Image (spheres, rainbow, N blue to C red):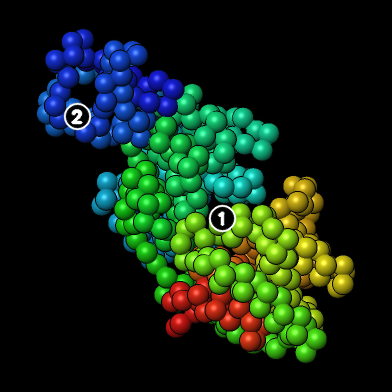
Amino acid sequence: MKLEFFSGTLELSCGKEESFPECLEHIFKYDPRTRNYRARGCDYAAAVIELRMNRIPFTDLAADYAFDGDWTLKEKITPRPHQKDALELWKQAGSKGIAALPTGSGKTILAVLAIAEVKRPTIVLVPTIDLLTQWAGVLEKFLSVPVGMLGGGSRQIEAVTVSTYDSAVLNMEFIGNRFGLLIADECHHLPGPETRLGASMCIAPYRLGLSATPELPEERMAVMKDLLGEIVCQVNIDELEGKVLSPYLVKHWEIPLDPEEYDLYTRARSCYLEFIRRNRIDFRQESGWGRFLALAARSPEGRQAFRAFLDQRRLARGGEAKVRALWEILRRHAGERIIVFTADNSTAYELGRRFMLPVMTHLTRAAERKEFLEKFRDGTYSVLITNRVLNEGVDVPAAAVGIILAGSGSVREHVQRLGRVLRAAPGKKQAVLYELVSAGTSEESVSSRRRSHRAYTR
C-alpha cells in the first residue's frame, strides 16, 4: 500500500480494490480515472493516524519535508503570559488550531515560537503583499533557517516560506507536500471559495491559524475549523489593555447634518425606501441586495431609486458637519500620529485634496505605500487618510489617534480599526478612537451594529 502526493491531493494505491481499509472510507473516495483512492492533501494527518492506529503497513511517499537544518532561534524570545498560554493550548490540541489574539499582541512572535517548537519546514499564508514582506523580515530576524517569499514577484521556496493566499492557491498543488507546518495569518480570509484551496492542497499535519477577529458565519467557520482546527485560545482586547496594549478611549460623536444637507438626505432616503417597500425587498434575506440591484436596473424609477440610495449614503457618510468635526479633531491632536478611516475612496481623496494630506487606498502603488508608511512612522507625516487598506495587517505602532469618518456595519472592521491605534510604543500613554456618526440618519443603526463587540462595551 502506497500513499503519494499528486497535484494537491493524496493518492492511496491498494493493489486490489477489495483490500482498501474500511477505516479510511470517511477520508478517501475511489477515483475510477486512476483506479486508486483519492483524498484532499489536508487529510494527510488523518489518513496516517488511521493507518498507524489500525497497524496497516504502508509506504509514505507523500511527505517531502525532511530538513536537518538548525531550528534554534537567533535571538532568545521570552514569551508574554498570553503568548505562553496560547502556545501551550495549541500544543495540547495536537499542534493544530486557531489562536484569536488582538492586534498588537504579538501573533507573529507566537508563530515564531510555534515554528521553533515543531521544527518542520513551514509555509506562512498572508492576505497582502505588505504582510508578505513584514512577515519575512520578522522570520529572518529570529530564525536560523533560510526564509523565502512566494508572491509579489518573488518565487523563492525555502525551509520557511511566506506566501500570499493567492500565490498559495496557484502553487500549492506543486509544493503542498514540502511543509510540515502551515500558519495562516488573518485566517478569517481562509474560508473564501478560492482561498481555501491553498490550505486544502497542503499536507502539513501541524496547523496554526491567527486572527484578531475569527468570528465568521456558520458555513465559513466550519470550513476554517476543518482546515485549521478549533479555536484553542481567545484573548480579548480589554484583557491586555494597559499591559501589552495601550490604554484606549473610544469617543462616539453624533453630529447633525447641516439643514440643507438634511433636507437632501430625507428626500433621497424617502425615494429609496418607497421603492424598497413597493417592491417588498427584504435586506435581511441573502438575496435582498441582488434583487434590489436587478429591479433598479429595469426602469427609470428603479434607476432613480438607486441614485437616491447613493445620495443619502454619501450625505450620511461625509456631510460638511462631519468634515468640520474632523478638522477640529485634527487640530486638537496636532503633532500626534492620526489615521483617518473613510468608507470609500472618493471621500478619502476628497479629504486629501481639501486638507493637503497623504491618502492611501488599494490604488496606491506599492512603492508609494511603503514611502507613506515610513514617513508616518518617522513623523514626517502625522496624518494618513485611508479607506480600508489599513484595516488590518499593517504594523503602525506610532498611531495614537484613529478617526472613523464612516464605515460599514461590520464588527470585524470596527475592531480592526481600533486595533490600528492599540499597539504600544515608547511615550504613548493612551490611544483614542473617534467615531463620527451623522445623527438622525441610517448611520445610527450601522454604528449600533458594529459596536456590539466587547471592546466597545467595557
The disc labelled 1 sits on which kind of residue?
A: Gly
Q: Secondary structure at mark 2?
A: loop
Residue 359 in the figure: left or right of residue 255: right
Q: Which image quarter holds the N terminus?
A: top left
The disc labelled 2 sits on which kind of residue?
A: Glu
Depth order, front residue of 435/118: 435
Q: Quadrant of residue 383?
A: bottom right
Q: Position of residue 296 (x, y in %)?
A: 65, 59
Q: Which image quarter holds the C terminus?
A: bottom left
Q: Which mark is residue 136?
A: none
Q: Quadrant of residue 206?
A: top left
Q: Can residue 111 be spotted in the picture?
A: no
Crowd band around label 1 with a 10 angstrom C-alpha radius: few (<14), some (14–19), many (20+)? few
Residue under label 2: 25
Q: Quadrant of residue 87?
A: bottom left
Q: Kindly identify the residue that appears in the image at 29 percent across and 12 percent down.
A: 35
How many marks overall? Answer: 2
Residue 447 in the figure: left or right of residue 382: left
Q: Kindly identify the residue that appears in the image at 70 percent across and 88 percent down.
A: 256
Depth order, front residue of 406/138: 406
* Label whose residue precedes the other's in the sequence (2 or 1): 2
Q: Is residue 12 above or below residue 115?
A: above
Q: Is residue 56 above or below residue 137?
A: above
Q: Which mark is residue 290?
A: 1
Q: Is residue 167 above or below residue 434?
A: above
Residue 191 in the figure: left or right of residue 308: left
Q: Secondary structure at mark 1?
A: helix
Residue 279 in the figure: left or right of residue 312: left
Q: Position of residue 420 (x, y in %)?
A: 60, 67
